[in-house]
Amino acid sequence: MFTITKYEQSSFVVEAEGVRAALDFGALSIVESVTDAGKVHISLVSHIHPDHFHLDYLLELGAPIYGPRQVVNELHGLTGEHRILTPSSPIQVSTLTIEPVLADHGDLSTPVENLGFVFSAAGRSVYFAGDIARFSEHPGGPFDLVLLPVGGGKVFDPVQAVEFLDTIDHLGLVVPMHYHGRADPKSAIEFMNLAGAHLDVRILEVGETLELK
C-alpha cells in the first residue's frame, strides 16, 4: 500500500513498505509542513530551483539527500549521506524501488538537470512527474497514480497536462500539483474539469493523505 501526503507546491511524503520518502520540500513549503512531515528515510529533490530545493528544510528532515548533480553539488561540505541520481541509477530502499526519469522543464534561460521519480512496491507504482513542461521521453508505466504539475508557466498547464496523460495512456488516479506560488491556484480546478470525465482526479489540500491500496 502507498500513502501519499501532499504539502505546498510539489512537496509530498510518499510512504510504502514502511519507507517514507520526502519529495521537493522547497521555499514555498512552510516550517509547519516540514515539522508535520515527521520522520523520513530519504529526501528526494527533482532539481535545484528554490521552490523545490530548500537546504534548511532538508537538514531539518534529517534524511539522506538524493538528487541530480547540481543539487548534490550544493551539499558539498555537509555531513550525512548524499547521492547523485541519474535516469540510469534506480535506488532500492528496503522493498521500495525509486527510479529517476527525465523531466523536460522546457526553455529556461539557465538549463537545469531535472528529474521525475517512479516509485514501485508490492505491484503498485506512483509516478511523480517533477517540473515537466513538455513531452520528451516516455516515463514507462502503466502507473496507479500520477502526481502531475498543472499550474502553467514553466510546467504543464491544465490542457497540456491532459494531453500528456493521454500520450502515456494513463487511466488511473491523478493528483495535480504545482499550482501554488506564482502559478494559477485555479488551474487544479480547471484540470479537474477537463480530465474528470475519464480520470479519477483528486485535489488534495495541504496535509491531506491519499491511500493507494
Image (tube, helix red, strand yellow):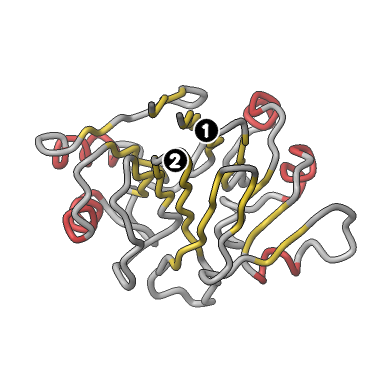
Residue, disc 1: 7
Q: Position of residue 31 (x, y in %)?
A: 69, 31
Alpha-carbon neighbours of circle 1 within 10 Å: few (<14), some, or many (≥20)?
A: many
Residue 1 placement (x, y as % from top left): 45, 29
Is 1 left or right of 135, judged from the image as shown?
Answer: right
Q: CA distance from mark 2 to mark 1?
A: 10 Å
Image check: 103 left or right of 31?
A: left
Question: Could you say which is closer to the camera, residue 94 or residue 152?
Answer: 94
Residue type at mark 2: give it.
His
Q: Which comes before the other along the chain, label 2 or label 1?
A: 1
Residue 83: name its quadrant: bottom right
Whether residue 128 is situated above or below residue 111 in the rendered picture: above
Labels 2, 1: front one: 1
Count neighbours of disc 2 (C-alpha within 10 A) and say few if under 14, some if 14 to 19, many if 20 or more.
some
Amino acid under disc 1: Tyr
In screen coordinates, is 212 left or right of 181?
Answer: left
The residue that appears at 65% across and 24% down in the rendered structure is: 36
The residue lying at 9 percent from left, 35 percent from top is 197
- Whether tag 2 and tag 1 are in contact, CB under 8 A, the answer is no
Give the SS element for disc 2: loop
Q: Which residue is mark 2?
A: 180
Q: Residue furthest left?
A: 197
x and y percentages locating residue 175 in the rendered image: 34, 37
Q: Nearer the viewer, residue 18 or 117?
A: 18
Left or right of 130? Residue 155 is left
The kind of secondary structure element at disc 1 is loop
Q: Position of residue 204 (x, y in %)?
A: 39, 27
- Which residue is located at x 61 percent, y 46 percent? 26
